[in-house]
Image (cartoon, grey):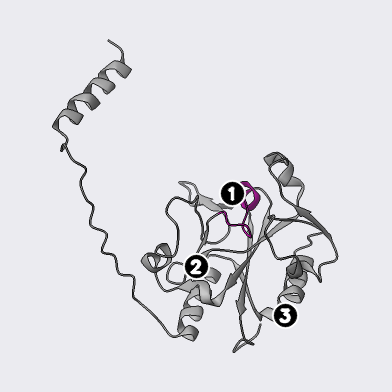
Amino acid sequence: MSSRTVILGRIREALVDAPPTPVTVPREYRVDRTLPDAERIDLLIDRLEDYDARVYRCDTAHLPAMLARVLTDAGARRVGVPTGLDESWLADFGGEVVVDGTDIPAPDLEDLDAVVTGSAVTCAETGTIFLDAGPDQGRRALTLVPDVHVCVVTVDSVEVGVPEALARLVPERPTTLVSGPSATVDIELERVQGVHGPRHLHVVLVDQAPPRTPS
């Protein structure tokens, strides 16, 4: 008797003892925590910088100039964007803009210097940005293959905690969680960045009005 047969047999035995009807899992999570805007954004910036992300702030009117500056400083000349990204965001960028598409093989995305995307929602408490493959975020490969990710986060999309952030997502959509640049640590505690995604994460926080303390 093979190991496969033994394992499948044990699963069948366990299913016989399983409840005949689906179990309802309690999901009364806290989803009503709030913080004043200034405290919430300060908390997010603290977490992002602790993860080694670069953080910038601007208002909507100055977003094109800010993105051009961030990309130029990062040495990016060829930048990928998802199909639904607002074209005006890169109006001040002087390099090449490549609109992603399903006809572009994922390995070819490595030729991009950077990628610019929007975001769905962000959790201040954990410094986590949630991407849900929306039109301004694109497919997962686009945000994992290039070495530099410039992510635009609007202040009104920042929630205090994870339950509040998850409540704004559609569970059926593919969700990518970004907490700083991609990094891993081996048993010798040697930190290596860029193993599973971009080595550099730049987060541009966008206020609807001029920010309190522009960077």
Callout 2, which amino acid? Thr
Q: CA distance from mark 2 to mark 3?
A: 21 Å
The residue that disc 2 covers is 122
Callout 3, which amino acid? His
The residue that disc 1 covers is 140
Q: Quadrant of the N terminus?
A: top left
- Badge 1 element: helix
Image spot of residue 29 (x, y percent): 29, 65
Q: Residue furthest front?
A: 21
Q: Where is residue 115, by image quadrant?
A: bottom right
* Sequence-first disc among 2 and 1: 2
Which portion, as a residue range, is magenta?
133-144
* Sequence-first disc among 2 and 3: 3
Image spot of residue 169 (x, y percent): 45, 60
Q: In this view of the protein, which residue sits in the foreground, 131 or 50?
A: 131
Q: In this view of the protein, which residue sits in the foreground, 89 or 2?
A: 89
Local crowd size for mark 2, using a 10 Å CA cut-off: few (<14), some (14–19), many (≥20): many
Q: CA distance from mark 2 to mark 1?
A: 17 Å
Magenta span includes 46: no
Local crowd size for mark 3, using a 10 Å CA cut-off: few (<14), some (14–19), many (≥20): some
Q: Please, is residue 84 above or below residue 41 in the view? A: above
- Residue 62, label in figure: 3
- Badge 2 element: strand
Which residue: 63% across, 55% down?
A: 199
Q: Quadrant of the C terminus?
A: bottom right
Q: CA distance from mark 1 to mark 3?
A: 28 Å
